[in-house]
Image (tube, grey):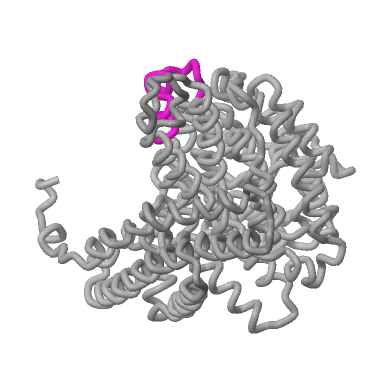
Amino acid sequence: MSNYQAPLRDMRFVIHELVESGPICALPGYADCDAGLIDAVLEEAARFAGDVLSPLNPVGDRDGARWLAGTDGKGEVRTAAGFADAYTQFAEGGWMALPCPPDYGGQGLPRLLAVAVSEMWKSANLSFSHVITLTHGAIEALLIAGSDALRATWLPRLVSGEWTGTMNITEPQAGSDLAAIACRAVPQADGSYRISGQKIFITYGDHDMAANIAHLVLARTPDAPAGVKGLSLFLVPKFILDENGNPGAHNDVYCTSIEHKLGVHGSPTTTLVHGDHGGSTGYLIGQLGRGLEIMFVMMNSARLSVGTEGLGVAQRAWQLASEYAKDRVQGTDVSQKSGERVAIVRHPDVRRLLMTQRSHTEAIRALAYTIAALQDIAHQSPDAAARDAAHRRVELLTPVLKGWSTESAVELTSMAIQIFGGMGFVEETGISQYMRDARITPIYEGTTAIQAADLAGRKIARDGGQVLVGLIQEMRADRNRLAGPNNPQLQAIAAHLGESLDHLETATGALLEKMNRQPAAGLLVAEPYLKLLATVVGGWLMGKAARLASQAIEGGSSDPFYRHKLASARFYADHLLPRSAGLVVTVQADNSTLLGLEDEAF
């Protein structure tokens, strides 16, 4: 199996031409950023991903992380061979610091660049990338709500990658229902808290890659009210810091086991027990009772990151399937009568599968990078109205990316296995790892159903779809620009996009009616609605890409990339956008019979 090769040409196209890096680099705080710097960073990240992380991906899958039992349940985790050394190189290379603020040692580069670099980590080695995602989430939570003392102590070493971070949310009885969290935090005379309880499914909750771990733990104090309003957030270090700020005594938080999983074997998913040996020391982040609000910062960051995971895994699976299809000789070319045996890439259905993967993945990339650019505007723009509009659109599109990208990754990695045929079903070729790894992505950081409920309830029904209406108006305006030039390719794309926008508007009206009349009826079709919205947004962005590609070709460019991009966009319009016709029927359907069935019917 070849090592991962980053799709730098498409990344640059989306960053510089589709999303337009110029205005992003011109935002306050990004004075040192320009197209040349972006390209240089992408080149170096691609080298690290391909040369260092990609060779470790099958190692992590085969060997996995290991739990070593200690005395009194004080176990510890060892990562797969090579992971710790790769992480040292990663931290020393300054990669953790790339999107972080300079005040704490970060490089302060745009999120638009950071998401492209993140895609590379996830394509090359999804299991390895998890430690990056969780650490960035901890950094964001501390930036928003940490005290000056916690920031000064912890942020420089998290930003540098010397230490890593986790989210400690889930408990055996509290998965999606966070109101059931029972972990306790008892105040101490010195201002700290004594933490006790069990947390499960904690990614990189213990490992041998960094000198310390900052666990961000949701817990409730003795006098806290029931429900989510009683939850507070605490920083619980793996090692208590000594008087010089260095890791000292082991805190009373230990890994008692790791999970044996379908995929992402190289990423340790741990059970952590706090306080079984005298009490675990923790420090309050923010205000009492406001823990869930802060944790949602980490969760939203993680949801966008998981959306990029779906993109990364789908991209790598397509890359391997494309290589295999060009090498595997089987059968003859039906378009010729010579009888000459050909590589399977010449077979019509293999071409359909490959282009489905390619166009779908390119649409997801366009959406992920668009959201990242909107985040830059929401955080850095000097215009308050622009910041607010960008923030609202990020909120609308975050569940769309997370839900669509991850569900698509499962579908697209399955297609890759199909191209390998029987060899795809055996571990020898390595392609099966990508489907196994992809399967967790629609589950963690909020299942697809949770993303759909968030989209339908909080992002659309709450304001009557006002933000969405603005997006639809923009998409219609761009559709009309496609239809204007005397270009048959663009006009065909515009025709499909116009029909799908009609479907989206009809479905939105149906969803709003159901959410207002009977929320259960709306939630029943929320996931199909999410897929409909995502499919149309993907078609809109691919249409914009097609217009740019056509302009480049008409301007005399001989770069074959533009011809391939135009073909990809046309395929998306012909083969993927028409899915909206079926989805709108589903969203409109009367499901009263289903909702009224007794439980025994299921």
Q: Residue at x 41, y 64 (%)?
A: 492
Residue 550 coordinates in the image, percent (x, y) = 58, 62
Q: Quadrant of the N terminus?
A: top right
Front residue of this view, candidates 490 and 297? 490
Q: Residue furthest right?
A: 244
Q: Residue at x 83, y 54 (%)?
A: 37
Residue 566 coordinates in the image, percent (x, y) = 53, 55
Q: Residue furthest front?
A: 338
Decide if residue 104 is on the left or right side of residue 137. Answer: right
Front residue of this view, candidates 386 and 364? 364
Q: Residue furthest top?
A: 428
Q: Residue at x 38, y 61 (%)?
A: 530
Decide if residue 243 is on the left or right side of residue 118. Answer: right
Name the image quarter holding residue 36: bottom right
Can residue 589 be found in the magenta stretch?
no
Q: Quadrant of the C terminus?
A: top left
Q: Residue at x 79, y 32 (%)?
A: 88
Determine the main secondary structure of the stretch shown in magenta.
Answer: helix
For the record, the magenta segment spans: 414-430
Residue 283 coordinates in the image, percent (x, y) = 69, 53
Can residue 420 be found in the magenta stretch?
yes
Q: Is residue 134 visible?
A: no
Front residue of this view, candidates 279 and 532? 532
Q: Is residue 36 visible?
A: yes
Q: Is residue 349 above or below residue 591?
A: above
Residue 346 coordinates in the image, percent (x, y) = 44, 31
Number of labels in the image equals 0
